[in-house]
Amino acid sequence: MSFVEYSEFIQEGDVAIIFMGHGSMLPVKVEQGAQTQTRYGVIRHSTDLIGRPFGSKVTCSKGGWVYVLHPTPELWTLNLPHRTQILYTTDIANITMMLELKPGSVVCESGTGSGSLSHAILRTIAPSGHLYTVEFHQQRAEKAAEEFREHKVGHLVTTLNQDVCKEGFGVTGVADAVFLDIPSPWEAIGHAKTAMKRQGGRISSFSPCIEQVQRTCAALAEQGFGEICTLEVLLRVYDVRPVSIALPDLGDEDPLQAGLDTPGEGGAPATPDANAAITLRTAMPPRDMAGHTGYLTFATKSPV
Ligand SMILES: C[S@@+](CC[C@H](N)C(=O)[O-])C[C@H]1O[C@@H](n2cnc3c(N)ncnc32)[C@H](O)[C@@H]1O
C-alpha cells in the first residue's frame, strides 16, 4: 500500500481505514497478531485483514460488519491523528489548483503540522515531483517523517526541522510553488522567493486573521510578487432528507362537475382530507454551516 499508488491486497505494515458508517471511520496500522476493537466487535488483523482485498466487507466478532478501505489523502485528512490544526479538503482542493500543482512539481511547504496538506500535495506531484516541508517543532517533524515513510511516500519528501522564518526551506531556485501555514508568513516571503525557480511560480498562504493577511500581502508586494489575491472558501453541503408536504385544500369542486364525476355514495362530492400530505425526498442545505476557517492568499513570482 502507498498513498500514491493503489494496491489490491492488504499487507502487514499497511494503513487501512475501517469504515463503520457515515462520519465513523478509524485508521489502523495492520500488524500480524494485532486486534482492533470496534463497536461491532473485534477485528483480527491476521485473519480479517492481511491478504484480503482493500474494499472488503469484514464481519467483526459481534456479527456487525465494516468496510476496510485503501487510504487516500482525502480519507487521511478525515482520520489522521491531530497534532495541530489541519487544512481540510475544501481549502486543499483550492490550493492544489491555484498553485497549479501537477505530477513533477517541486513544492516547498511550512509548517508540516499534522501532514494533512502534505499528503495531498504528495499524491498530486507523484511520481517525479518533490516536497520540501519545514517544521520547527522537533517531535512534529519526526512524526511526520515517520508517517511519510510508513505511507511509502518518503522518497518524494524531505522533512526539515528548522525555523522557516530564520533558515528558509533549505533549497534555492528549485520550487514551482510555495505554501505557508504558519503564524507569521510575512517573515518567510523572502525565503520563499529564494526557494522558487528563476522562471517564477506560485505562492499561497493560509491565515485565520485578516491582520495576518494584510502583513503577508504587504510583504508579497514588497518582494515583487504580482497577481496578489485573497479569498475565503466556504463549503455548502446539501443533505437529502424526507419532507412531508401538506396537500392544499382548494375548496369545493364545481358542484355540477362534482355531481357528475364523483362516484361517491348517492353522487355526493368527496370531502377533501384536511390532513392529506405527501412525503418527498429533497435536498436541503443544513441550518448550521461551518463558518470561517481562514483566508487563502495567492500570488505569482514573475520570471527574473
Ligand atoms: C497549523 S499547523 C500546519 C498544519 C498543516 N498545514 C496541515 O495541514 O496539517 C502550523 C505548523 O507550523 C509550525 N510552525 C509555526 N511557525 C513555524 C516556523 N517559523 N517554522 C517552521 N514551522 C513553523 C507549527 O509548529 C505547526 O506545526
Image (cartoon, grey):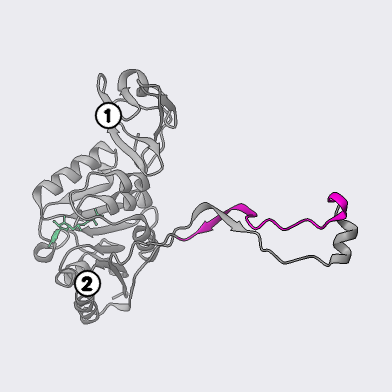
Q: Is residue 194 visible?
A: yes
Could you tell me which residue is drawn at 29 percent across and 38 percent down? 152
Could you tell me which residue is drawn at 30 percent across and 57 percent down? 106
Image quarter in which the C terminus is found: bottom left
Q: Secondary structure at mark 1?
A: loop
* Residues packed near mark 2 inside 10 Å, few (<14), some (14 to 19) or many (20 plus): few
Could you tell me which residue is drawn at 31 percent across and 37 percent down? 26
Q: Secondary structure at mark 2?
A: loop
Q: Where is mark 2, residue-wise? A: 209
Can you give x and y, in whole percent of width and height, for residue 169 in the image? 17, 60
Which one is earlier in the sequence, the residue at label 2 or at label 1? Answer: 1
* Residues packed near mark 1 inside 10 Å, few (<14), some (14 to 19) or many (20 plus): some
The disc placed on residue 13 is 1
Is residue 229 part of the magenta span, yes or no? no
Q: Inspect the image, locate mark 1, and give the three-letter code of the amino acid beneath it.
A: Gly
- Residue lying farthest to the right in this orientation: 260
**Residue 41 or residue 277, whichever sits in front:** 277
Side of 11 where 248 appears, left or right = right
Tell me where the magenta segment starts and ends, as one range. Answer: 264-285
Image quarter in which the N terminus is found: top left
Q: Inspect the image, locate mark 2, and give the three-letter code of the amino acid beneath it.
A: Cys
> Which of label 2 and label 1 is nearer to you?
2
Above or below, comparing residue 274 to residue 139 in the picture? below
